[in-house]
């Protein structure tokens, strides 16, 4: 019989950190099945592809993310991910700031969104654990409390970063990052080539370079090219999953099932299985970013040690969040040169990234094809636009001490921040959410729904460190 103690869907961050903790806590007799829709497309082959060298035939026709769902967008929007072994760890940039304590209580502090059913303190221990596993590089002073230092030394700041750090201290820091600052284990030191999507020196953390061993554990069977599209449910208990492999539909049975197939497919699988929770699929959201170029008349910028060197928190938190979105600032250290003689280095580029408020009108729905969800997206909340209206004024407030010649803003040019959130929100009960504080479905008590779909509110900070910490916490508290 195709029967397991645990079935996990997906091999990205959410699934891998859950699996890691589960294996640590389980006896040697346990049987785990992991199913992923994609292939194991190794780093070495990805590098060859990037260099336009010949790659093995089996990797030439992998399904691209945009063929995995249908669009019903009112506004232009992209939802980007890597549907293969390791998920988007293969292509992420590796920015890993923590959330701050106030992010977990937006409703009680600022009257917007929803409070999380957990606090920052509940997660702090698991933040440390993920940071140690990913070997995060970061500074000693941060705007969020930490119970232990980062393992790797911080990235070197650029000239402009140093000035901002001198002025704003803990509110302007070297960005915590999964791009290793020194060679560690099988990972090279970040080479500052700024092509992080596929790191040429294998510096950034990926599931493949650090956690692949989990999938070779004798307790684990890994089945690739296997798309889960339904659940087998009776009496509110999930008995197993239905999947397609090599064109054939098959079933596997498990005592416990954990969905880690990201916020789009977790919701789609639940909807296909007939989940009636009001919130399932609703709240599809992402942050909204806008690039701003600063031109200086006297200041030469350069010198940081990675692609994104710093995070600014000056506009992240405060009473203003009652009225408009908080924003994290990323300092871009990509090659950017002015063409005017004598002014080549008198430029700096920042991204201002706003939090959004999940809206029920933005959602994952069953599509016409049972294997493809339909994504309905009407746009971000007014909360973001209200913050955008204040941006110029805030830039003047926080940056005017610099010798600025002119400022150029791009007005949300980028269509995605690549962070898919809030389609299976966590909360205290099924009247306000899909899952509980341990990521267990309110109705199906043997079903975990992992990942950033759990976020009741999204924050300005990047989600992956937090969703990985949530997976560790869920497995730790439940087994
Ligand atoms: C270009 C890019 C840059 C990014 N940079 C950052 C960053 O700097 N910092 C940050 O915090 N975040 C970043 N992100 C976001 C980050 O990658 C995601 O938050 C993270 O990957 C989500 O992890 P996950 O495990 O939930 O989902 P994923 O990584 O999407 O993994 C899901 C897994 O499930 C599998 N799967 C999907 N559907 C099914 C199914 N039906 N059946 C079986 N398997 C299935 C997929 O193949 C995949 O392996 C970036 C994303 C992109 C695309």
Image: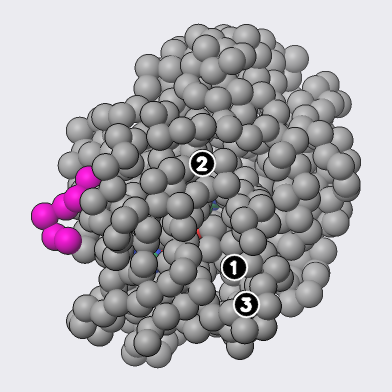
**Residue 388 horizontal side relative to residue 167, left or right:** left
Between the C-alphas of marks 2 and 3, the distance is 27 Å
Between the C-alphas of marks 1 and 2, the distance is 19 Å
Residue range (magenta):
365-370
Residue visible at 60% across and 36% down in the picture: 461
Question: Which is the main secondary structure of the residues drawn in magenta?
Answer: loop
The front one of 326 and 183 is 326
Local crowd at mark 1 within 10 Å, few (<14), some, or many (≥20)? many
Q: Nearer the viewer, mark 1 or mark 3?
A: 1
Q: Which mark is residue 19?
A: 1
**Residue 239 horizontal side relative to residue 417, left or right:** left
Is disc 2 in contact with disc 3, using a CB cutoff of under 8 Å? no
Helix, strand or loop under label 1: helix
Residue 291 to residue 127: above or below: above
Residue visible at 62% across and 56% down in the picture: 478
Nearest to N terminus: mark 1 or mark 2: 1
Q: Which residue is mark 2?
A: 436
């Amino acid at each position: 019989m195709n029967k397991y103690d645990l079935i996990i869907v997906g091999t990205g961050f959410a699934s891998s950190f859950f699996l890691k903790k589960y294996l640590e806590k389980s006896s040697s007799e346990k049987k785990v099945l992991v199913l992923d829709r994609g292939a194991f497309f190794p780093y070495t082959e990805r590098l060859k592809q990037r260099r336009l060298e010949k790659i093995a035939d089996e990797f030439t026709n992998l399904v691209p993310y945009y063929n995995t769902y249908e669009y019903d967008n009112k506004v232009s929007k992209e939802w980007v991910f890597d549907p293969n072994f390791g998920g988007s760890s293969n292509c992420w940039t590796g920015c890993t700031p923590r959330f701050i304590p106030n992010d977990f209580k937006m409703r009680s502090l600022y009257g917007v969104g929803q409070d999380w059913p957990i606090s920052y303190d509940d997660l702090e221990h698991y933040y440390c654990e993920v940071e140690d596993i990913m070997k995060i590089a970061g500074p000693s002073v941060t705007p969020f409390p930490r119970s232990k230092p980062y393992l790797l030394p911080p990235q070197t700041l650029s000239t402009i970063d140093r000035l901002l750090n001198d002025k704003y201290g803990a509110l302007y820091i070297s960005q915590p990052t999964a791009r290793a600052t020194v060679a560690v284990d099988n990972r090279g030191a970040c080479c500052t080539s700024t092509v992080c999507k596929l790191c040429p020196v294998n510096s950034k953390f990926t599931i493949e370079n650090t956690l692949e061993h989990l999938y070779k554990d004798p307790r684990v069977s890994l089945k690739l090219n296997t798309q889960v599209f339904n659940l087998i449910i009776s009496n509110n208990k999930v008995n197993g999953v239905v999947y397609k492999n090599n064109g054939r539909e098959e079933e596997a049975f498990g005592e416990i099932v954990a969905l880690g197939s990201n916020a789009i497919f977790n919701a789609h699988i639940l909807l296909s299985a007939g989940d009636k929770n009001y919130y399932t699929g609703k709240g599809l959201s992402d942050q909204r970013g806008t690039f701003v170029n600063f031109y200086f008349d006297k200041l030469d910028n350069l010198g940081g040690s990675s692609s994104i060197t710093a995070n600014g928190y000056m506009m992240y938190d405060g009473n203003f969040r009652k009225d408009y979105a908080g924003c994290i600032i990323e300092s871009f250290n990509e090659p950017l040169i002015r063409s005017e003689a004598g002014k080549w280095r008198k430029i700096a580029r920042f991204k201002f990234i706003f939090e959004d408020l999940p809206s029920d009108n933005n959602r994952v729905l069953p599509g016409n094809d049972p294997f493809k969800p339909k994504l309905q997206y009407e746009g971000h909340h007014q909360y973001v636009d209200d913050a955008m209206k204040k941006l110029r004024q805030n830039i003047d407030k926080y940056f005017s001490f610099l010798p600025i010649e002119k400022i150029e803003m791009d007005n949300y040019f980028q269509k995605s921040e690549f962070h898919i959130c809030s389609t299976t929100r966590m909360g205290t009960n099924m009247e306000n959410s899909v899952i509980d504080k341990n990521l267990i479905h309110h109705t199906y008590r043997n079903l975990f729904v992992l990942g950033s779909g759990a976020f009741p509110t999204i924050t300005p900070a990047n989600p992956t460190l937090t969703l990985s910490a949530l997976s560790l916490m869920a497995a730790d508290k439940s087994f």
